[in-house]
Image (cartoon, rainbow, N blue to C red):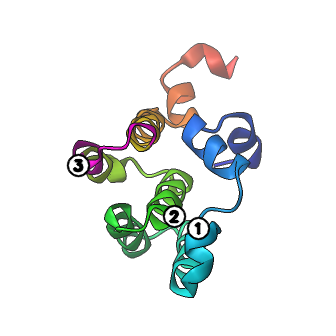
Amino acid sequence: MPAAESSTFRPAALQRLSATQPVGDDTASQENPGVVDRVAELQTLAMNNDADSLGQIIVSLSDPDPGIRAAALAATIQFRSPTAIPALQDQLARTAAPQEKLDLQQAIDFLALPPLAQANSNNPSADN
């Protein structure tokens, strides 16, 4: 997607996650360098455009560490693939934390939006 589009609209979950301290960089995560490494790996995977990377991200949505789950959610949003929606819905059904539920639902809603180019191709007047 064009850079202009990504800077004009970001789901609230991603805005909230990126407005706070780096995901996975809280006190508990600092005590566990594996968490920090996994968060960095998820951020790298989010930049790829392949099913294997998305699969690795999705697996981390159910990680026991909340920092890793948050990083996996941010990576899923950045990946921008609607194929992640069923995994997000499964995680939503299993999650008890209200803020995490809200973030998951916002991610689902965002990924369900049609791409801008696809929306324009369905609207002939947009070309004029």
Instruction: Let me know if residue 96 is in the magenta part.
Output: yes
Separation of disc 1 and disc 2 at Cα? 4 Å
Amino acid carrying label 3: it is Arg
Q: Which residues are magenta?
A: 90-99
Tell me the crowding category of disc 2: few under 14, some 14 to 19, or many 20 or more residues within 10 angstroms, Cα based.
Answer: many
Residue that label 3 marks = 94
CB under 8 Å between callouts 3 and 1?
no
Q: Which of 40/10 is in front?
A: 40
Query: Residue 21, relative to residue 31: is it above or below?
Result: above
Separation of disc 3 and disc 1 at Cα? 21 Å
Q: Quadrant of residue 60?
A: bottom left
Residue that label 2 marks = 67
Amino acid carrying label 1: it is Gly
Which comes sooner in the sequence, label 1 or label 2? Answer: 1
Disc ID at residue 24? 1
Secondary structure found at label 2: helix
Looking at the image, residue 109 sits to the left or right of residue 126; the answer is left
CB under 8 Å between callouts 1 and 2?
yes
Which comes sooner in the sequence, label 2 or label 3? Answer: 2
- Of helix, strand and loop, which mostly describes the magenta segment? helix
Secondary structure found at label 3: helix
Query: Residue 87, relative to residue 96: is it above or below?
Result: below
Question: Where does residue 11 sit, x and y in percent of width and height?
Answer: 58, 37
